[in-house]
Amino acid sequence: MSAAHTFDPDTLGMPPVYTLNLSAAQRSALEWLTSRGALFAEISVDVEEIALDCGTSVSTVHDALARLTALKLTEHPDPTRYRVNPRYFFASNPEIRRLVAEAIDAPEITPDARAESPRKVGNVASKRRRTIKAVPDSE
């Protein structure tokens, strides 16, 4: 990429999580979703399971999920599915956000002639493949 079009990792960020004044129930629900893979895909959510796992009431979980959705920390496309906003991950992991930017700006890795030639098999491995051992009878 040219310097004029350099990727800015801060565009992946969001306000620091601590500035959002999340309640313990909201943080627990967000962590529950993240630990179940909702950062990578929409997942089906059972609020009773979240309440049981997090040691809170079902109504508290509903309130927590509603606030997380209002803050756009989660997407809620239908009544039972949620996905965590990927920006949350990058806000929580600024070093990875910087690494992504470096990877985008880094030159592409290009294989050389040796990489494209057939792989050499070592002498020991080739002998091992050619040796046939008798299997003893198990009578």
Image (tube, grey):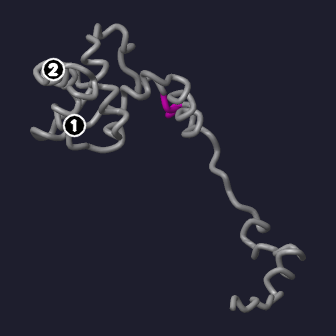
User: Label 1 sits on what residue type?
Assistant: Tyr
Q: What residue lies at 25% left-to-right and 16% top-to-bottom?
A: 25
Instruction: Provide the major secondary structure of the magenta segment.
Output: loop
Q: What residue lies at 41% left-to-right and 28% top-to-bottom?
A: 89
Q: Looking at the image, is mark 2 or mark 1 nearer the viewer? A: 2
Let me know if residue 95 is in the magenta part: no
Residue 48 relative to residue 29: left or right: left
Image quadrant in which you'd find residue 36: top left
Residue assigned mark 1? 82
Looking at the picture, how far across and down is residue 96, in whole percent?
53, 30
Query: Where 23 sits versus 114, above or below?
Result: above
Query: Where 36 sits versus 31, above or below?
Result: below
Looking at the picture, how far across and down is residue 133, in whole percent?
80, 88
Q: Which mark is residue 57?
A: 2
What secondary structure is found at the residue carrying circle 1?
strand
Marker count (numbered)? 2
Q: What residue lies at 39% left-to-right and 13% top-to-bottom?
A: 16
Q: The magenta stretch spans which residues? A: 4-8
Looking at the picture, how far across and down is residue 21, in whole percent?
29, 7
User: Label 2 sits on what residue type?
Assistant: Ser
What secondary structure is found at the residue carrying circle 2?
loop
Query: Where 122 sits versus 22, above or below?
Result: below
Q: Residues within 10 Å of mark 2 (few under 14, many from 20)?
A: some
Mark sitting earlier along the chain (2/1): 2
Image quadrant in which you'd find residue 125: bottom right
Looking at the picture, how far across and down is residue 99, in whole percent?
57, 32
Q: Nearer the viewer, residue 106 or 46?
A: 46
Quick one: quadrant of the C terminus?
bottom right
Q: Residues within 10 Å of mark 1 (few under 14, many from 20)?
A: many
Q: Which mark is residue 9?
A: none
Q: Nearer the viewer, residue 90 or 44?
A: 44
